[in-house]
Image: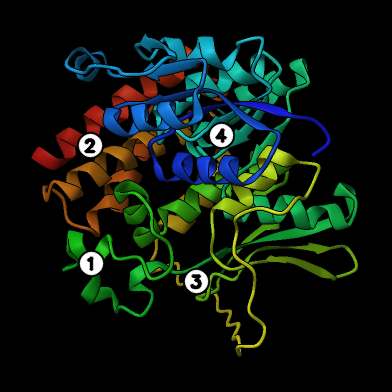
Amino acid sequence: MTQPQRIAILGATGSVGRSALDVVRAIDGLEVFAISGRSQLDLLVQQAQEFKPNYVVAVDPSSAAKFDFQTSAEVLIGAEHLKTIACHEEVDTVLASIVGFAGLESALAAVQCGKRLALANKETLVVGGHLITAAAAASGSEILPVDSEHSAIFQAIGSGKRSEVKKILLTASGGPFLEFRADEMHGVTVEQALNHPTWEMGRKISVDSATMMNKALEIIEAKWLFDISPDQIEVVIHRQSLIHSMVTFADNSTMAQMSPPDMRLPIQYALTWPDRVAGPAVDFDFSVAQQFDFQPPDFDRFPALELGFEVARVGGSSGAVVNAANEAAVEAFLDRKLSFTDIVSACREVLEQHNFESHPTFEQLVAADRWARQEITKWITA
């Protein structure tokens, strides 16, 4: 690596955080300066005992109050300390892997303080893309994507000039219901939605993959990450999840980033960029026959996709509203209070009812988030 990196992993006990620590184990020059977690405090302490960070942030005070922290690290209790860690003078890179709207404030703080932001939290740009990109421009912060699709685009786009990009193609596995008929979608159970054919993910992200709301959010994220028009973004179904996304240039040459499904690779690339070093990600076995299939998505069966394009075009407060509505609707589905097909329907209805702000402040985004969640509650009980 060009130089050592001191990393703050915000969301260390989640799937991305755990994979990031696998990368740290494998690569010299990566030092864990701080970690945070909300509820899995046993795991958080185990991580602290192994990696010996300077700080451990326990986000939820009620959980922390009942816990005996056996670690030499300084323990900070409360979500307000995430911003402190994100801006700490000894931190080089902040890995933002806190799920949902909750990750926006600390990610924004990191960018405002000029840190390199390894961004796994897609909601940060979905909700506050205008704030994040403006802050990065002012501070000189680098934003490096950790999502496998956006990391692939970031890697492929380097094959040419930004001005030469014709379009980007976001690949999607299609989730567990790609072959379901529309009438079969109405009876989808929680267990079916959590059974992703390729990736092992958290419950919320698994449901987002099943509705393809994850791809809708990635459309919005791509707009901000790559400063590209939504009309230059396409979604293509690639069931094998081996090609993680593609970029087509002005001469109609298409560059793809390809690897076996392993989140450790995009995490590592964000942490070690601009270097490529040996790491824990698995290699392709080309001695075995591989198949690559592509097909267009069905916008009728997966209406979240069109919703994503609409929000990307409109911008403003719409991203905060759709994101919050989706988080609340998915939680209701997991609690068996809302049907699978009602998740996206509820999101669209809430979006159409909200008072649009073209350039919302952070405080207005917080208010929009709160309002949308309340509207979903009304939608469920109506």
Residue kind at label 2, given as amino acid type = Ile
Residue kind at label 3, given as amino acid type = Pro
**Mark before the other along the chain sequence, 3 or 1:** 1
CA neighbours of label 4 inside 10 A, class few (<14), some (14 to 19), many (20+):
many
> In the drawing, what numbered circle is on residue 192?
1
CA neighbours of label 3 inside 10 A, class few (<14), some (14 to 19), many (20+):
some
User: Does residue 254 appear in the picture of this structure?
Assistant: yes
CA neighbours of label 2 inside 10 A, class few (<14), some (14 to 19), many (20+):
many
User: Which residue is at the front of the view, 290 or 111?
Assistant: 290
Q: Give the Cα separation between the discs numbered 4 and 3.
A: 24 Å
> In the drawing, what numbered circle is on residue 297?
3
**Mark before the other along the chain sequence, 3 or 2:** 3
User: Which residue is at the front of the view, 24 or 333?
Assistant: 24
**Mark before the other along the chain sequence, 1 or 4:** 4
Q: Which residue is mark 4?
A: 125
**Mark before the other along the chain sequence, 4 or 3:** 4
x and y percentages locating residue 236 in the rendered image: 58, 69
User: Which quarter of the rendering shows the N terminus?
Assistant: top right
Asked which secondary structure carries label 4, the reply is helix
- Please, is residue 93 above or below residue 20 in the view? above
Instruction: For the residues labelled 1 and 4, say whether their Cβ atoms are less than 8 Å apart.
Output: no
Q: Give the Cα separation between the discs numbered 1 and 4.
A: 29 Å
Residue kind at label 1, given as amino acid type = Gln
Asked which secondary structure carries label 3, the reply is loop
Asked which secondary structure carries label 1, the reply is helix
Q: Nearer the viewer, mark 2 or mark 1?
A: 1
x and y percentages locating residue 178 in the rendered image: 38, 74
- Residue placed at 34% from the left, 49% from the top? 202
- Please, is residue 223 above or below residue 137 in the view? below
Q: Which residue is mark 2?
A: 376
